Amino acid sequence: MNRYRALILGLITVFLVLSSSLAFSGERFTDNGDGTVTDHQLGVMWAKNDNQGNIDWRQAEKYCRWTFPYLIPTRYDNWRMPTIEELASLFVRDKSYKGYETDCGRKVKVVPEIRLSCGWVWASEPMTIDFEMKGKEIKRRTISAKVYNFQRGYPYTDLMRHSKDYRALPVRDLQDGK
């Protein structure tokens, strides 16, 4: 009788573990129905779409902080540019996933919940460079920033003034689970 109880309890435990893991698998993203997607893995909310056109880094920063919040019905005030690590988490490395073709004709392997109109997205990290002008004091200038390539899945650095095929993808940290 004790063996029978142990077997039943074991089967119930296995069933509960499997059912709870299945319930949470594949639910990294929730489409909020308002132009945003909640990313439960990172604890952030993404814009469902990028800015839909060429944009340089400074314009991308303004778009994420000031323009995008007024384009969606739910008004949150903490939108920002994503970090390179956050962007990298959206790249699908699975060889069986073919990705999709963007409006600019590039094939990207980004999670299907996010729609990009081209393959490169600006990250929040600017790069500062030191310049020495003919023996004078060293001046620091910020002229480049990181970009994530969703066509091939790697970050690189480019001049902030470049805009061709670059996009802005706003993100915000979730507050109090909202």
Image (spheres, rainbow, N blue to C red):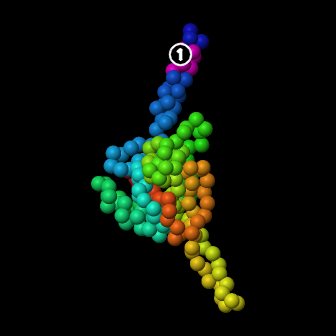
Hey, which quadrant is residue 144 in on the image?
A: bottom right
Among all residues in the image, which is located at the extreme top? Answer: 1
Above/below status of 13 relative to 30: above
Residue located beneath label 1 in the image: 8
Left or right of residue 74: residue 1:
right
Q: Write down the region rendered in magenta.
A: 5-12
The reply to whether residue 134 is in sight is yes
Residue 111 left/right relative to 52? right
Q: Neighbour class for label 1 at 10 Å: few (<14), some, many (≥20)? A: few
Q: Is residue 96 inside the magenta stretch?
A: no
Q: Identify the residue at image location x=43%, y=55%.
A: 50
The reply to whether residue 44 is visible in this rendering is no
- Please determine whether, in this image, residue 17 is positioned above or below residue 106: above
**Relative image position of residue 128 (x, y in whole percent):** 60, 73
Left or right of residue 103: residue 155: right
Which residue occupies the foreground of this view, 139 or 107?
Answer: 107
In the visual, does 64 lie left or right of 134? left
Residue at 50 percent of width and 59 percent of height: 165
Q: Quadrant of residue 134?
A: bottom right
Q: Tell me which residue sits at (57%, 69%) in the image.
A: 159
Q: Please identify the dominant SS of the magenta region.
A: helix
Q: Is residue 172 above or below residue 14?
A: below
How far across and how far down the image is residue 169, in percent?
A: 45, 57
The residue that appears at 38% across and 50% down in the rendered structure is: 36
Residue 7 colored in magenta in the image:
yes
- The amino acid type of the residue labelled 1 equals Ile
Q: Position of residue 78 (x, y in %)?
A: 40, 61
Q: Secondary structure at mark 1?
A: helix
Screen quadrant of the N terminus: top right
